[in-house]
């Protein structure tokens, strides 16, 4: 059995379970952070769209990524009628 730092943290027992849970929590936080950054700069989240379509519209085929991206860009930038900015 390993007695090094990782062996003690990730080995069997409560400390290893806590370390694995912490790793999973940090991974999830990283995914949320990446998604937030993408939304801030206007990059739509295709994975979320696919999950939404599967859950709420299973009878409809989801758009291809290219079509989804184009539609999201049009919704964001193309609906500005009657305004100069």
Image: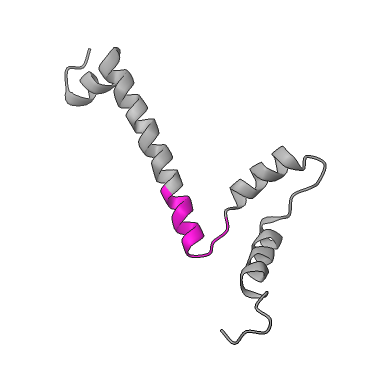
Task: Please identify the quarter of the rendering in which residue 56 is found.
Answer: top right
Q: Is residue 4 above or below residue 62?
A: above
What x and y, as percent, mark residue 72?
65, 64
Q: Main secondary structure of the magenta part?
A: helix
What x and y, as percent, mark residue 9?
24, 22
Quarter of the figure that contains the N terminus? top left
Left of 39 or right of it: where is 5? left
What x and y, as percent, mark residue 29?
40, 41
Q: Which residues are magenta?
A: 33-44
Nearer the observer, 31 or 8: 31
- Residue found at x 82% / y 41%: 59
Nearer the observer, 1 or 43: 43
- Residue found at x 67% / y 75%: 78
Residue 11 in view of the camera: no
Residue furthest to the right: 59
Residue 41 in view of the camera: yes
- Residue found at x 39% / y 44%: 30
Residue furthest to the front: 82
Q: Is residue 23 above or below residue 18?
A: below
- Residue found at x 58% / y 58%: 44
What x and y, as percent, mark residue 34?
44, 51
Left of 25 or right of it: where is 63? right
Q: Is residue 78 above or below residue 52?
A: below
Residue 60 covered by magenta stretch: no
Picture mark count: 0
User: What colour scheme does the image use?
Assistant: one colour
């Amino acid at each position: 059995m390993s007695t090094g730092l990782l062996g003690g943290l990730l080995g069997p027992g409560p400390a290893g379970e806590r370390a694995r849970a912490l790793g999973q929590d940090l991974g999830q936080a990283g995914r949320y952070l990446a998604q937030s950054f993408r939304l801030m700069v206007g990059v739509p989240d295709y994975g979320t769209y696919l999950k939404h379509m599967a859950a709420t519209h299973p009878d409809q085929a989801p758009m291809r990524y290219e079509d989804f991206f184009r539609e999201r860009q049009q919704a964001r930038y193309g609906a500005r009628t009657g305004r100069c900015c």
